[in-house]
Amino acid sequence: MTDDELEARLRRLDARPSKDAQFWTAMAADVRAAHERALGERRSALRRRRWMASAGGALAMAAALTLWMRAHHGTPPAAPEPADTFHVFEDLEPGEMLEELSPAELDHLAKAFNKGA
């Protein structure tokens, strides 16, 4: 096939009948409808994906809490239970507290008060 024959054949294939305004209006309506349908499918897919991500996150947090509770189930509480005996400390007056301090502690206390004054 020569170049001229190929060119003639392409021209024959390209010859289209002329379209009227009704054809173009119908085609535009079909394109709009297909576009709206595609957007609707896309929105429902995004909505479904968001819901699944939220549900997956909640399930992961519940699983992590369950595993943490199972691992720490047998450990004793942070503060031990009170013993049978307990000590009651008397409230001392400020003068009595000063009497119980050593001379070094008294000097340190005096320096601290002098800094603030």
Image (cartoon, grey):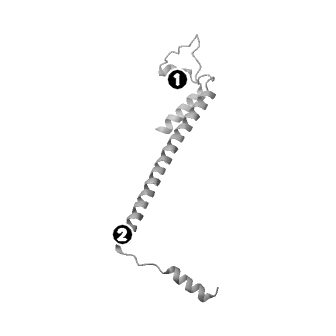
Q: Secondary structure at mark 1?
A: helix
Residue under the point 45% across and 50% down: 44
Residue under the point 48% across and 46% down: 48
Give the left or right position of residue 36, taking residue 76 as reference: left
Residue 83 occupies which quadrant of the picture?
A: top right
The front one of 117 and 60 is 60
Which residue was labeled with disc 1? 98
- Above or below for 78 versus 19: above
Residue under the point 48% across and 81% down: 15
Q: Callout 2: few (<14), some (14-19), or many (20+) C-alpha neighbours within 10 Å?
A: few
Residue under the point 46% across and 78% down: 16
Residue 46 location in percent, x, y?
Answer: 48, 51
C-alpha separation, residue under disc 1 versus residue under disc 2: 101 Å
Which residue was labeled with disc 2? 25
Q: Secondary structure at mark 2?
A: helix
Give the left or right position of residue 28, taking residue 103 as reference: left
